[in-house]
């Protein structure tokens, strides 16, 4: 799929207020996109938790995004992206995930470094370079964390959260929620213990107070509950 023309057009498009969104406003658009992709209502409190800011900060940014015609908010306070906001957010998510794949597959960077590097690079990535990098990573359909790259016939696989799996069941990791990428210690923990897309573990124990204890030959590890809820996958009916 060639997105060069549409991406270029998007980058030249002005918002309804006549000004382009700032880097911080773009960051909020991405988070709204992530939350909406889970079919969760997007409200200011969720944005504040994700962004780790106080509610007044969110209120200020949301007001600016409303003025620029990039989001809408209903009577219940639920926020949705407008058509322009969605296209802008999706383009940014696409570039970010392509870059993460490139940084791992081609450059050999470890997981805990790629998110921040991709953030630095994504705003300067031209459509020509985007297509070239996409070719270098074999037109991958997901980022290294298993999340789909927009425009690549994307499908969110793995609809079961690790913290809901019962003891005795086998669990195949499919993807890691985007908010985990913001936490270097979490990403390092996942990579160091092989908690990556495609890995299969048997759930030995699952308690809210302790977390999820996973086992496979030669390894037993307890995943804290706050990390287990960021890991999505499938319950396997048999070893594959």
Image: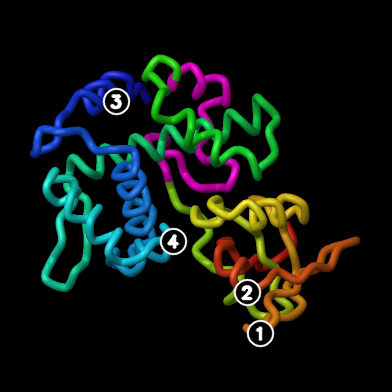
Of labels 3 and 4, earlier in sequence is 3
Whether residue 175 is situated above or below residue 130 in the rendered picture: below
- Residue bounds of the magenta highlight: 130-154
Q: Which residue is mark 1?
A: 209
Of labels 1 and 2, earlier in sequence is 1
Q: Between tags 3 and 1, which lies in front?
A: 1
Helix, strand or loop under label 1 = loop
Check disc 1: other Cα within 10 Å, few if <14, some if 14-19, many if 20+.
few
Looking at the image, which residue is at 62% across and 74% down? Answer: 225
Between the C-alphas of marks 1 and 4, the distance is: 24 Å
Q: Between tags 2 and 4, which lies in front?
A: 4
In the rendering, at what x and y percent does residue 224 appear?
67, 72
Of labels 2 and 4, earlier in sequence is 4
Q: Main secondary structure of the magenta part?
A: loop
Of labels 1 and 4, earlier in sequence is 4
Choose between 121 and 94: the one closer to the eye: 121
Between the C-alphas of marks 3 and 1, the distance is: 46 Å
Between the C-alphas of marks 3 and 4, the distance is: 30 Å
Q: Which residue is mark 2?
A: 225
Helix, strand or loop under label 2 = helix
Q: Which residue is mark 3?
A: 7
């Amino acid at each position: 799929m060639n997105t060069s023309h549409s991406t270029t057009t998007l980058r030249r498009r002005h918002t309804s207020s006549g000004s382009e969104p700032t880097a911080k406003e773009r960051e909020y658009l991405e988070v709204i996109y992530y939350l909406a992709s889970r079919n969760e209502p997007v409200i200011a409190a969720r944005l504040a938790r994700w962004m780790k800011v106080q509610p007044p900060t969110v209120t200020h940014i949301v007001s600016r995004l409303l003025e620029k015609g990039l989001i809408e908010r209903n009577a219940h306070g639920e926020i949705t992206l407008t058509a322009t906001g969605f296209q802008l957010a999706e383009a940014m998510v696409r570039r970010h995930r392509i870059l993460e794949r490139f940084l791992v597959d081609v450059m050999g960077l470890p997981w805990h470094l790629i998110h921040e590097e991709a953030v630095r690079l994504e705003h300067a990535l031209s459509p020509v370079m985007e297509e070239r990098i996409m070719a270098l990573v074999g037109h991958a359909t997901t980022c290294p964390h298993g999340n789909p790259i927009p425009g690549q016939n994307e499908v969110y696989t793995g609809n079961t959260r690790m913290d809901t799996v019962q003891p005795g069941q086998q669990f195949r990791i499919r993807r890691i929620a985007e908010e985990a990428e913001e936490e270097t210690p979490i990403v390092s923990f996942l990579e160091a213990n092989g908690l990556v897309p495609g890995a299969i573990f048997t759930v030995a124990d699952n308690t809210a107070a302790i977390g999820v204890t996973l086992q496979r030959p030669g390894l037993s590890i307890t995943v804290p509950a706050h990390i287990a809820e960021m890991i999505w996958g499938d319950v396997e009916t048999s070893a594959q």
